[in-house]
Image: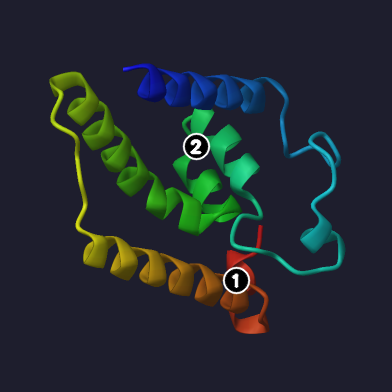
Amino acid sequence: MVPPALVVGGLAAATLALHLRDPHEQGSWGLCPSAAIGIYCPGCGGLRAVNDLTDLQLGAAASSNLLFVVALPFVLYAMVRWTHGRWTGRAWSVPDRRTTVLTVGLVGVMLLFAVVRNTPAGSWLAP
């Protein structure tokens, strides 16, 4: 149970830090290199989305990074399955083919999201 406890503890500490130090304030967490040159990557707005979620503002979080908010339930599901597998001693294994398909699909969605949010038609997706 040590690995899941470390991951959950690290995520909890990061979430608390993002709640206490508002990333909506310019420069509070440093400068994003891609945003500095005017390109919004798939992760841009993710810190603000976490901060908004800690304040229970789902709409504001989705406005900061819609992809993060949509992906969060799937990430939580995977964390629960992994932790449950560790707890019960039955490791959760995902078939290699499914892992490959999911990875390629996720990378494709992230690339599409990045391209669309940097076009005039998708500017509403920008943080």
What residue is drawn where x is 60% and y is 82%? 121
Q: Of the residues shown, which amino acid type is indicated by label 1?
A: Ala
Q: Is residue 50 left or right of residue 72?
A: right
Q: Marks 2 and 1, how far apart in space?
A: 23 Å
Could you tell me residue 27's position as x and y percent? Answer: 86, 40
What residue is drawn where x is 32% and y is 67%? 100
What residue is drawn where x is 64% and y is 41%? 48
Viewer-closest of 98 and 64? 98
Q: Of the residues shown, which amino acid type is indicated by label 2?
A: Gln
Are there few (<14), some (14-19), or many (20+) residues within 10 Å of tag 1?
Answer: many
Q: Quadrant of the N terminus?
A: top left
Q: Secondary structure at mark 2?
A: loop
Vertical side of 46 occupied by 23: above or below? above
Residue 55, which numbered label? none
- Please report contact status of discs 2 and 1: CB closer than 8 Å, yes or no: no
Residue 57, which numbered label? 2
Q: Is residue 63 left or right of residue 17?
A: left
Vertical side of 65 occupied by 24: above or below? above
Find disc 1 in the rendering and name its residue. 114
Q: Secondary structure at mark 1?
A: helix
Viewer-closest of 54 and 109? 109
Q: Quadrant of the C terminus?
A: bottom right
Is residue 10 shown to the viewer in this render?
A: yes
Q: Is residue 20 left or right of residue 25?
A: left
What residue is drawn where x is 66% and y is 64%? 41
Which callout, 2 or 1, points at the residue further toward the start of the chain?
2
Could you tell me residue 39's position as x and y percent? Answer: 75, 69
Could you tell me residue 87's position as x and y percent? Answer: 20, 20
Is residue 55 shown to the viewer in this render?
A: no
